[in-house]
Image (tube, rainbow, N blue to C red):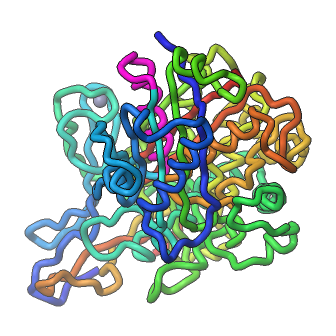
Amino acid sequence: MSDAYIVGAGMIPFGRYPDRTYFQLAADATLMALDDCGLSIKDVGVVYASSTFNAASMLGQKMLQQIGQTGVPVINVSNACASGATAVREAFVAIKSGLYDVVLAVGAEKNPRGMLAGSPVDGPPPEGLFGSVSMPALFAEAGMVHANAYGTTIEQFAQVAVKNHHHATMNPKAAYRKETPLEEVLASEMIAYPLTKLMCSANVDGAAALILVSEKKARELGLSRAVRLLGSALASDPFEPRNPDMLDPNSVTRLAVAQAYEMAGMGPEDMDLVELHDCFAVAEILHYENLGLCADGEGGAFIDSGATALGGRIPVNVSGGLLSKGHPIGATGVANMVEIIDQLRGEAGARQVDGAKIGMTHVLGFGTGSAAGVHIFEKA
Amino acid sequence: MTSTTNIARKAGNKSVRVGEDGSVWIEGYRCGACGAVMPVQTIACRSCAGRVAPEAYRSPETGTLYTWSVVHRSYPGVAVPFVSAIVDLDGGLSFKGTLKGVPFEALQAGMPVRLVFDDAGGAVDGDGHPYVGFHFVAGDAS
Ligand SMILES: [Zn+2]
């Protein structure tokens, strides 16, 4: 079975694009990824196109109508916030199958404005009557489980936002590039305790694309900037008694990461950096533990130790993460891989993690169920 | 709560049941093979995939507070702040609901709470049928 390599990566700056469509954004990112490796859309054998909100309107075909209708198969993917990782996972499977030598995975989103909610239900609008259906409340409740069990403080949760906003100041493609000291994070509008506004992800538009190739094709193109995809895992919510009344970020993430580590033949101690799904500041603390970066219950102390900041033992979200780079939902899972690839190539500029050889990405999707994707990359 | 209308009330939530006599209760489903409990009728067991459909049971309305958030920003028209709570009912079901009458600083994981049926904020469906909803109160409240 051929190894899968990433040879091309592209990401547009995240922000607001009022004058461009989601499929134009997808085309922009795709052309960047193709130019990155000197290939043409005519070389691509199959397309996996991710958009949480627009997969059903044939994002991939609309994109090809912009840049070249080569007639290849297109699979449009929607899997909540894990859509992008799902597209890459399928691209990986396509390479592994031996059927294709060059595969495109692209994610693009123009996010709806305002606070995101879970899926609608039958009966009267539930908000306020049956608790809150807002995503901030849902993650706040998950954070409070951690706070109640381990004494994690709002200051520790807020430090995630301080760190990731700091990282974003070094990323010219991040939507928000502004330092936010702890006092400012704590003093910003309270949304759902313990989450203030600056502890919620940046709701923006964006697109990102990767070109995956077989080993044969990678050698033909040259391995100097290639990155090997060692592990690709996707999991759905296993049975948990409270799910889905309380969506569980932990069990589905743990299921995915165990598979990714096994596939890669590695463990958390092997990772040089991680991009994980910090949709809300509390989530990053939970995922330190879910991904095995620290022991259960120690997430609060782990952020305090500085281990996850640039220059620390295992930098997390040096791109700025979803909190400040931004969270265009269907693009997010591809974009955090673009960051890892830039880092493993040594091309990440001011936020470069010294000597990075192995990196991991994680995304978590919540809707009426859950999905998590974990990918592990190694410099070729 | 009492109903002063002769228009039949409707369940305002997937697990609320309204009897022909107007009585209301919470229904859960329990798998006879593995004992797993779920809030809706499924075709097979969600947990063990056993092909005998989990059987309906009438849930107790007492339980404990698992977790919560005090919600300060909501959607237009929704009064804030309020407590969005996850409650584990005795018997195994867990629900999200609004917890009322407890000062925010007195909230404690594991505190006893009780489900109380209500009129779902006065909501009615398109034909004027009033909904039956619920919220939670501290377990020792009346
Ligand atoms: Zn069962």
Q: Report the side of A65 relative to B127 (left or right).
A: right
Residue A166's image quarter?
bottom right
Q: Residue A130, image x and y in percent?
A: 41, 70
Q: Residue at x 52, y 52 (%)?
A: A331
The magenta segment: A81-101
- Which residue is at the front of the view, A57 or B6? A57
Q: Residue at x 57, y 40 (%)?
A: A250
Look at the image and tell me in which quarter the C terminus of chain A lies.
top right
Give the overall secondary structure of the magenta segment: helix
Q: Is residue A107 magenta?
A: no
Q: Quadrant of ligand 1?
A: top left
Looking at the picture, does residue A291 appear above or below residue A77? above
Q: Residue at x 54, y 65 (%)?
A: A205
Q: Residue A292, image x and y in percent?
A: 70, 30
Looking at the picture, does residue A240 appear above or below residue A133? above
- Which residue is at the front of the view, A211 or A273? A211
Q: Residue at x 83, y 56 (%)?
A: A170
Q: Report the side of A245 relative to A351 (left or right).
A: left
